[in-house]
Amino acid sequence: MNIIITGKPGTGKTTLIKRIKNHLEEKGARIGGIFTPEIREGKKRTGFEIIDIMTGERGILAKRGAPGPRVGSYGVNLETIKKVGTPGIERAIRSADYIIIDEVAPMELKDPQFMIKVEEALSSDKTVIAAFHRRLIQNIKDRGDVQIFEINPKNREIIYKKLKSIIGGE
């Protein structure tokens, strides 16, 4: 089973996935995959990190004005995707009960191997809970093994409860 969360930036995709992760951990599940939190300096977003959930390894995914392939004003660090992101997904496929991928977006896709690993996770026997950039949902919407939830500020709590029901535990 694959649960895909999409929505506009700032609608709570990452927060929802973190809540689901915490719920699963409380139930004793082993969680793997990646998170890509924002890096902020004061109130200004200056970049993104990538964190392997199982190992805690982290690195800079993208930084405003940094060298590397561009996504808007951000330079993407391909080495970090190769050293933290892709291995984090591989490790989760091998060892986790549930795979979390936050998020599949243009920055991560600057490394073609990243989407290959996402596809492997989606095709595995593990439940995947992933946030997809809304423009990339086309890539997977025709799969028969995905349920897509579009989040917005008004339906966040309803979707959280629905996801808990789907994965078990309320």
Image (cartoon, rainbow, N blue to C red):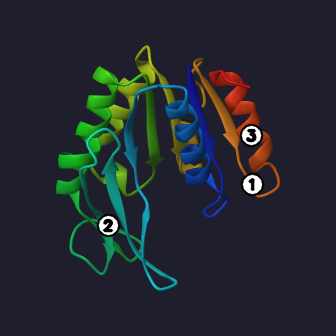
Mark carried by residue 8: none
Residue identified by numbered label 2: 62
Graded by Cα atoms within 10 Å as few (under 14), some (14 to 19) or many (20 or more), the crowding at tag 2 reads: many
Q: Residue at x 49, y 33 (%)?
A: 25
Residue identified by numbered label 1: 152
Residue identified by numbered label 3: 159
Q: Residue at x 30, y 53 (%)?
A: 110
Whether residues under marks 2 and 1 lie with C-beta atoms below 8 angstroms apart, the answer is: no
Whether residues under marks 3 and 1 lie with C-beta atoms below 8 angstroms apart, the answer is: no
| Between discs 2 and 1, the one toward the N terminus | 2
Query: Above or below — where is 114 with respect to 116?
Result: below
Query: Above or below — where is 71 with respect to 101?
Result: below
Q: Residue 101's quadrant in the figure? A: top left
Q: Nearer the viewer, residue 56 or 87?
A: 56
Whether residues under marks 3 and 2 lie with C-beta atoms below 8 angstroms apart, the answer is: no
Amino acid type for the residue under numbered disc 3: Ile
Quarter of the C terminus within the rendering: top right
Amino acid type for the residue under numbered disc 1: Asn
Q: Nearer the viewer, mark 3 or mark 2?
A: 3
Amino acid type for the residue under numbered disc 2: Ala
Q: Nearer the viewer, mark 3 or mark 1?
A: 3
Q: Nearer the viewer, residue 36 or 139?
A: 36
Query: Above or below — where is 105 with respect to 159?
Result: below
